[in-house]
Image (cartoon, rainbow, N blue to C red):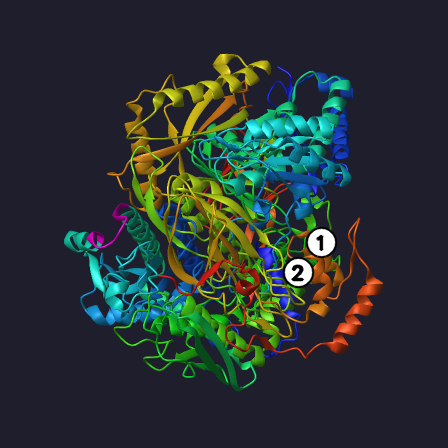
Amino acid sequence: MMSIKNAIKQKSSKKPRKIQKSNKKSVAKKSSKSIDPITFAVILNRFKTIADEMTITMEKTAWTSIIALARDYSVAIYDYKARQVCMQDALPIHTNSMHVVLKEISETFKDNIYEGDVIVTNDPYSGNTHVGDFVTATPVFHKGKHMFWSVAKGHQLDVGAYVPNSVAIQASDVWQEGLQLPPIKFYEKGERCEDVVRMYLANVRWQEWLYGDLMAQLGSIWTGERRLKELSKEYGNAELEKYMESILDYADRRMSEEVKSYPDGDYHGVSWLDSDGKGKSNIKIGAKVSVRGDKIHVDFSNSDPQNASGNNGSRGVMQAAAGIPILCTIDSTIPHNDGVLRHITADAPVGSVCNAKYPASTAAATVGPGDTMQEAVWKALAHAVPDRVMGGNGKDGNLPMLHGVDRRGKKDIDFGMMLFNAAAAGGASATCDGWPYFMTSAGMGGLKIMSVELCELFYPFRIDRQEIAADSVGHGKYIGGPGIDFCLSPVGGGFQCELFGEGQSNPPFSVMGGMPGIGGGSYKENLRTKKRKYYSSKGRFELAANEIWVGVSSGGGGYGDPLEREPDAVLESIIDGMLTVESARNIYGVIISKNPMTVNLKETKALRKKKRKTRKPREITSPNIPGAATWVKENLRAGDEYLLDAH
Amino acid sequence: MGHILGVDIGGTFTHFSLIDGKGEISLWKQATTPKDPAIAVKAGLTALAEAEGVSIDDFLKDLDLFVHGQTIATNTVIQRNGPKTALLCTEGFRDVLYFRDGFKPDRYNINLPRSKDFIRRDSRLPIKERMDYRGKALVKLDEKSVRDAAKILKKQKVESVAVALLWSIMNPKHERQVKKILAKELPGVPVVLSSDVLPMIREWERTSSTVLSAYILPKISTYMLELENYLEKNGFAQNLLIMQLNGGTATVKQLLDRPIYALASGPAAGPAAGLYCADRVGVKDVITIDMGGTSFDVCMVTDGQPDLTKDLRVHDNPVGVAAVNVHSIGAGGGSIAWIDKGGALQVGPMSAGAEPGPACYEMGGENPTVTDANVVLGYINPDYFLGGRREINPKASFRAIEKKIAKPLGLTTEKAADGIYQIVNTNMVDAIRVVSVEKGIDPRGYSLVVGGGAGAIHAGALGRELGIKQAIIPQYTGVFCSYGMIASDVRTDLIKAFATNTSDFEVKRVNEIFAEMEAEAVAELRSQGFARSKIEISRYADAKYSNQIHELTVPIPSKGKLKKSDSGSIAEEFHSLHERLFTYAVRESAVDLFHWRITARGKLAEREAVVHKRSRRPVSDAKKGTRMVYFNEYGKYRRTNIYDGDLIRYGMTVEGPAIVEQANSTFVIPPKQTLKANKYGDFVIGIS
């Protein structure tokens, strides 16, 4: 594992990156006599180990697949000033903004923070990401001094919205999207506030499961608390604080060098939401990325006003979405703590789609709006540091919330689950092809799919097909990860589906002359009449016993000119099911001879030469117009219906 | 009693541990022959026979037990040089192997490529069939689709086939039919079924385990059968036993039925090696560490039981079956010290390996390594490296550390060397914490057992860092795992799936399942000559809260038939394990039970160890001299006593600081620690 990482690092540093070699500020020198480099390394590693242990507890003990399998959660360690000290294996959209919500928690309770407290909130207007994300934080004390926050954030299966979906994208306001919890205590001085917890559980669906997830989250932060106390005891408060400070400075210095390697300037990128969820299409999000010395500011003012739905960004999401692409362009071995985050600021007008005004709903903030903000930032970065960016990632299209009654057993059971197995892929980079199942840039590949067998055991449906969708990728010198060809049938009776996705009519973008992903889409088909209803990326519908739901998700965006992809790599991609012989010829200019399949080099050379002469010039990013995807148009048959934002 | 022999193939050396009828131990190292490892094995056997003054025939005839740790399986998967392998899967699910669990590690690294799959898509072929979650055939097996697939595989010259169909754990009928058809269509090509290899829910893990099995089967089969044949021809009259990744041994026949158990064969003997010397001094909780040239392997043993994991992976592909949890990191004598871009000192995971090796080898290696630091600090005697068999130049160590570490960090050379020593220790301490802390275990109640050429240089410091009270250095520390093999029981693990829970415990079916599995395991062990009284069976269940997703494996009553009322104690076993690991339990919830497991062990005859008499001689008898040695505690070099390890007898105590030298290993006794030899010839460092 470690050696692979290092190999990658060496590989990527061969790229023509404009990083100064003049990094003479070593840990030992800069921090003079008082910081011992050995102790420094020991403590740095210890924080990582603690965060890892918190992660394991959360994942291994959670009660819903959204946490235990999809891993839609994050854990992190903050200091008492709410500065991020350590983030390990977590979701970028969470951890790049958790300091915002922790600051609110600190300000809310000021001096009323005690050992044994557990403070929770899901309030997007208190700096949280969206109502579905449930923050649990416990202060860690040693010798009476508040040293750290041990924090976990988990996406709950339900939040008591007007529909059984914790991403109620069609919600009109905060009261429709779910129960609002401003910072409140679930535990005080080690005692559970039973009445408060009871009130919370009374307001959500599938209480028993959510209680299990709550306990998993508490187990995680208590594990962190236990270890952080040991650490404080081992080194003493003052010494530990000193080293923590030096760890933040260390990341700060490395980040500073990285940002300085960006050319100063203002860079622009524009992207679009498919719709507001209520029939209004193509909502614009624009980013201006300003680089000055070792600071980067992201300004989203060139964006449309907020939507009258839950498809809006929150302040926390706006902050995180601005930073994630930038963090992906720096050396991935730099520890992600406050020292890094302090170099990036972000802003968007209150009342815009990036930063909604109370009481607007931000139910889907982390996914559609967050992903689209990230996309606009990536597109801007493509002009600043083209060899360090990636093609667009698929968003949360074909990622339905399914709910209803499971009638298969002796007793009928209410069920609800979020299905990740049909989701979209990640984009390509300047050195490698994309990965499948990115699902959303909020997770950058950190979400997992569920075993088909576990799905069929737990829930009343059958998966009939789950395979690579050929030619769904964004073509390029490096291709995006493949989309999924997926088919699902209800078992024992129908149920309800809620699509709350993005990135289908506005597909994952490409960079440096590559091509976008297909965008994809989904439909349900009546097995008797064979009639199909196609859905846009959002919609609510009933899937009846005699119907199937079919989804083809988008591949990720491509990087670089397809005519520059190695002909052998094109052949390999055909064997791997990503490309077809036709696309090899039409898009890559590669001629494949059959039996056995080989590249016809001579014809390929000629065809590529001809294509280079006749085609349009390549663009740095593409598409640069809204609603560019054509999948639905190409697949709609006579007599099929297309429903925009069905509800 | 005859002789017993353990043979472990390592990266550099093939290690032999031989114990004769009186309990006397002989150790032998033979340079490994990577292309055909059997050459080194045969050469070592010949050398051992010569040393005993007998013919190879007589030597082998006199062997009661021959246990072998092979590297064929591991090397085949690591180097990807296995045969052309194919996978037959349920139609609609050709890409299970490619999709994995949808997870991308290291998410901020957009330049991370995916590791390659073991089988490309053109050899992953769909079969028309479908079982549902109860094992009912929704689509009957279409035999023609199997024959069509076979035709393609024939063209591709496929040499091994994995079959992994959805829900075969609930009903293996279709998989078995496929095997039958393939036997006809592809005669001579081995076929491995997922319902045989790993009858557990979760198709990716099961498919992966089956594919790895099919991938290694042809090679291990050739190697093991040839070796078995050679031994038989030369007089060996017993079963050749192979070390398995679960920490027990198995016959060649057993392993060829379940090839996945042949992976990670050598290091899995670590716990047995550790327990052997710990058990005889009454210690049951140990952490074994094995530090060689490139890697550092750690295992936990609690109450005499090695820690097992179900998360072992090969290039991101899960092995699936329970394996000895050998946590391995890139920390060894050859690990390179370097300074990262932010100016932090790092050690490893890159290694200078055997070539070019540490700077002091002067074979072209310019990077300072842990060995170089140990030379600079005075821990390693440059005139007695590997017992004087290898010449090293301490000046080269000084130069490398000064240039690459000391100057850039503004430290003296000895401070920089001490920094390297401390950092690599920290890495190893972290590795130990990962295996202990992840299991909710406080390592402070454990003893370290130290293996590998470099282990004893670091053991005292590791122990102190972890708050561990003693480190045991067995006399076989240099050939640790080969010794562990001959102390390992024969072991068979079996699994079956059946869903029930503790509030409505379907005890009748569970008892049937255990009866079936136990009958199978007992029959196998009896055929190897184990009396029923020497066969020990333990039962386990995979348990979780209803609706919880991941299971924990808990032990359940293993004697006689289970009663309906046992569900209470099973539930409590789960609650308390959950609480210990994760800080909490939900006692009001029922507990779901899904997989049922047994472990059957054939216990080997106990052998008496040689017991030494207490010596009345003073420890000064063993003193070789003094030299300047650096200790972090003093912050400077200090004249330190050097002892000859071979002369330290039971009854003697060496006071730290001191260095003890043996031909194959060096012990560092830090200040305030002591080293004693016990009556079995092992050494114990007492850590203050």
Graded by Cα atoms within 10 Å as few (under 14), some (14 to 19) or many (20 or more), the crowding at tag 1 reads many
Magenta range is A201-208
| Residue B113 seen from this side | yes
Q: Residue at x 69, y 66 (%)?
A: A587
Q: Residue at x 65, y 63 (%)?
A: B398
Please tell me the numbered disc located at residue B392.
1
Graded by Cα atoms within 10 Å as few (under 14), some (14 to 19) or many (20 or more), the crowding at tag 2 reads many
Q: Nearer the viewer, residue B627 or A257?
A: A257
Q: Quadrant of the N terminus of chain B?
A: top right
Relative to B512, is B260 above or below?
below
Q: Nearer the viewer, residue B429 or B610?
A: B429
Please tell me the numbered disc located at residue A545.
none
The chain letter under disc 2 is: B
Instruction: Name the secondary structure under disc 2.
Output: helix
Q: Nearer the viewer, residue B164 or B427?
A: B164
Label 2 or label 1, whichever comes before in sequence order? 1
Position of residue B199 measured from the top left corner of the image (x, y, whole percent):
51, 32
Residue picked out by circle 2: B397
Q: CA distance from mark 2 to mark 1?
A: 9 Å
Q: Type of residue at label 1?
A: Ile
In the image, residue B539 lies in the stretch drawn in magenta: no
- In the shown orientation, is residue A488 left or right of residue B44? left
